[in-house]
């Protein structure tokens, strides 16, 4: 599965998501793209999952006709996310295209 990290997602998380292929928006040169345009670019490149920490995205975007799933992390804190990598992986593996999923990280 191809996963695209949004700007706020801690890059060290990528090592915990094997065997999935992880790329960052920065690496793709998409740092200036926002919301809908970023989702469009991700879909055009056949990403399955868009991983973000932007909790407002689910209120700003409609995924009904999209082929990508959006997974939202409830924090940007790497130490907290690191402790919840199994939960993140489970949500990613069960994410459905055209839907938002939120990972609540204590």
Image: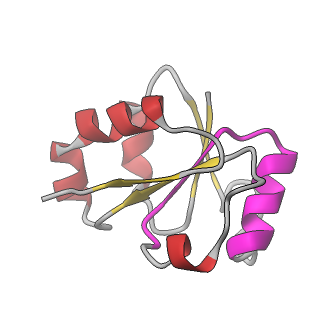
Say left or right for 103 vs 96.
left
Figure quadrant of residue 86: top left
User: Does residue 75 show up magenta in the picture?
Assistant: no
87 is higher (above) or lower (below) than 71: above
Quadrant occupied by the C terminus: bottom left
24 is higher (above) or lower (below) than 56: above
Figure quadrant of residue 76: bottom left
Q: Nearer the viewer, residue 66 or 105?
A: 66
Q: State which region is magenta.
A: 35-54
Please tell me which residue is depicted at 75% across the width and 74% down the height of the picture: 33
x%, y% of residue 45? Answer: 83, 44
Q: Nearer the viewer, residue 8 or 40?
A: 40
x%, y% of residue 102? Answer: 37, 56
Q: Nearer the viewer, residue 67 or 29?
A: 67
User: Does residue 44 show up magenta in the picture?
Assistant: yes
Looking at the image, which residue sits at the far right?
44
């Amino acid at each position: 599965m191809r996963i695209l990290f949004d700007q706020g997602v801690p890059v060290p998380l990528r090592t915990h998501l094997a065997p999935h292929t992880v790329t960052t928006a920065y690496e793709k040169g998409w740092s200036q793209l926002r919301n809908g345009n970023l989702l469009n670019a991700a879909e055009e490149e056949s990403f399955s999952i868009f991983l973000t920490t932007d909790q407002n995205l689910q209120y700003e975007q409609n995924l009904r006709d999209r082929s990508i799933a959006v997974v939202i992390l409830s924090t940007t804190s790497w130490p907290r996310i690191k402790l919840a990598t199994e939960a993140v992986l489970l949500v990613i593996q069960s994410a459905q295209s055209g839907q938002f999923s939120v990972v609540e990280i204590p």
